């Protein structure tokens, strides 16, 4: 996920109407100050705010995130929205790992240390693990699939995956 700022307010209803006239977009207006569009079917979601701020989610990697930003800015320029330099940054990333084996979550939660995990199966079907030596958060499911977040750095995510793999091997 990334966010940017056009540096000016925009009239969302006019922008959405102009985008519809120029492109084959999907749009959902949440209020008069927030709208989400997709410039292509199944493409990234661009959330636009009346203030000129925007967010982009749903890309597969950092390069695609920045390409999606350029696609949005080009579309806005094409319909006549004027703006200067646009600051943009990646805010978050989600990495997926699959350990290819079923995981006994109760056993794992105890092994990882109850001070480092949240596990309430009535509330959420996975273990939430915050390894103290890493800055990430992992959502670990019984299927062996894991979501790693809390970093935009792929190497940190891979280190987290390796750490969890080591912990799982200790359970065998």
Image (spheres, rainbow, N blue to C red):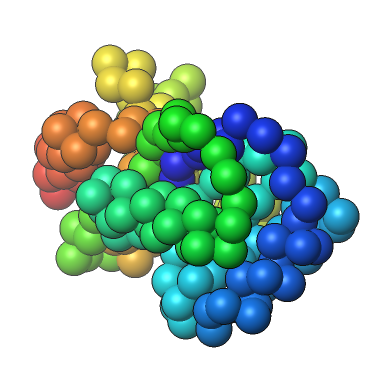
Q: Is residue 42 visible?
A: yes
* Nearer the observer, 17 or 106: 17
In the picture, measured across the screen, residue 56 lies left or right of residue 14, that is: left
- Image coordinates for residue 96, horizontal then vertical, percent: 29, 55
**Residue at horizontal 46%, vertical 52%?**
73
- Image coordinates for residue 76, horizontal then vertical, percent: 54, 57
* Nearer the observer, 43 or 145: 43
- Image coordinates for residue 95, horizontal then vertical, percent: 30, 49
Q: Which picture quadrant has residue 13?
A: bottom right
**Residue at horizontal 23%, vertical 60%?**
98
**Residue at horizontal 58%, vertical 63%?**
79
Q: Is residue 96 visible?
A: no
- Image coordinates for residue 148, horizontal then vertical, percent: 34, 43
Q: Which picture quadrant has residue 74?
A: bottom left
Location of the N terminus by quadrant is: top left
50 up-or-down from 24: above or below = above
In the picture, measured across the screen, residue 109 lies left or right of residue 98, that is: right
* Nearer the observer, 55 or 23: 23
**Residue at horizontal 24%, vertical 32%?**
153
- The count of marks equals 0
The outermost residue toward the top is 133
The outermost residue toward the right is 32
In the picture, measured across the screen, residue 78 lies left or right of residue 165, that is: right
Q: Which picture quadrant has residue 135?
A: top left
């Amino acid at each position: 996920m990334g966010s940017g700022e056009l540096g000016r307010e925009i009239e969302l209803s006019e922008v959405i109407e102009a985008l519809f006239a120029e492109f084959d977009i999907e749009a959902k207006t949440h209020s008069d100050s927030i709208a989400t569009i997709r410039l292509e079917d199944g493409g990234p979601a661009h959330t636009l705010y009346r203030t000129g701020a925007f967010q982009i989610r749903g890309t597969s990697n950092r390069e695609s995130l920045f390409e999606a930003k350029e696609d949005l800015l080009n579309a806005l320029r094409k319909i006549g929205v004027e703006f200067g330099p646009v600051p943009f940054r990646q805010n978050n990333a989600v990495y997926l790992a699959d350990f290819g084996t079923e995981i006994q979550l109760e056993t794992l939660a105890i092994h990882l240390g109850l001070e480092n995990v949240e596990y309430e199966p009535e509330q959420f079907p996975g273990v939430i693990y915050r390894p103290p030596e890493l800055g990430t958060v992992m959502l670990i499911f019984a299927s062996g699939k894991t979501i790693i977040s809390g970093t935009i750095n792929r190497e940190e995510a891979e280190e987290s995956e390796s750490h969890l793999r080591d912990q799982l091997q200790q359970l065998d």
